[in-house]
Image (tube, grey):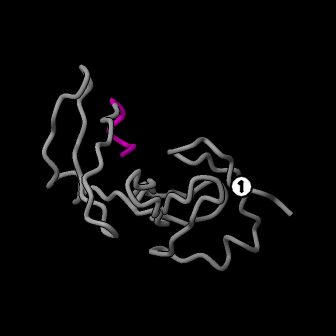
Amino acid sequence: MATLEIECPVCAEVLELTDEDRAELMVGDVIVCDSCHSEMEVTRNGEGEDFDLELLGEMTTCPNCGEEFEVTEDMLAAAPVQVLDGVEVSVVSCPHCKGLVALELMDNPDVI
């Protein structure tokens, strides 16, 4: 049985999909990384290595309430960008406690 190894774009954890796993996946299905809990949508699932995922969002933990939440591209697009201690950050609101959370911006446009 062949296994397809995919590297998580957020934490670089290797996700392994067997032929049986892939047979059950349809375009639009979501795979969650066991390590960082980032969600990736299946955008292509063909034969052999013809398989693609698109990052849906990245999980983060609120420093105010300790709850985990997903940071989406829409959330970042609406967030003001500020410079704190010489570092550019986006300030988002925690959906649980409504506290403000500063997220450091990364240079890689494929990773939130």
User: Which residue sits furthest right?
Assistant: 1
Q: Which residues are magenta?
A: 107-112
Q: At 43% from the left edge and 54% from the top edge, which residue is drawn?
A: 58
Q: How far from the left and from the top, in percent, is residue 51?
A: 56, 58
Per the image, the residue denoted by label 1 is 4
| Residue 30 at x, y percent in the picture | 51, 71
- Is 79 situated left or right of 40 in this image? left
Q: In the image, what residue occupies the spot 24% across and 58% down?
A: 93
- Residue drawn at point x = 15 percent, y = 35 percent: 82
Residue pictured at 48% horizontal, 61% vertical: 40
Residue nearest the viewer, comparing 57 with 60:
60
Q: Secondary structure at mark 1?
A: strand
54 vs 99, left or right, is: right
Q: Which quadrant does the N terminus fall into?
A: bottom right
Kindly identify the amino acid type of the residue bearing the numbered disc 1: Leu
Q: From the viewer's side, name the closer residue of 89 and 56.
A: 89
Q: Position of residue 66 (x, y in %)?
A: 47, 59
Q: Is residue 110 magenta?
A: yes
Q: Position of residue 83 (x, y in %)?
A: 18, 28
- From this view, report whether residue 84 is shown above or below residue 5: above
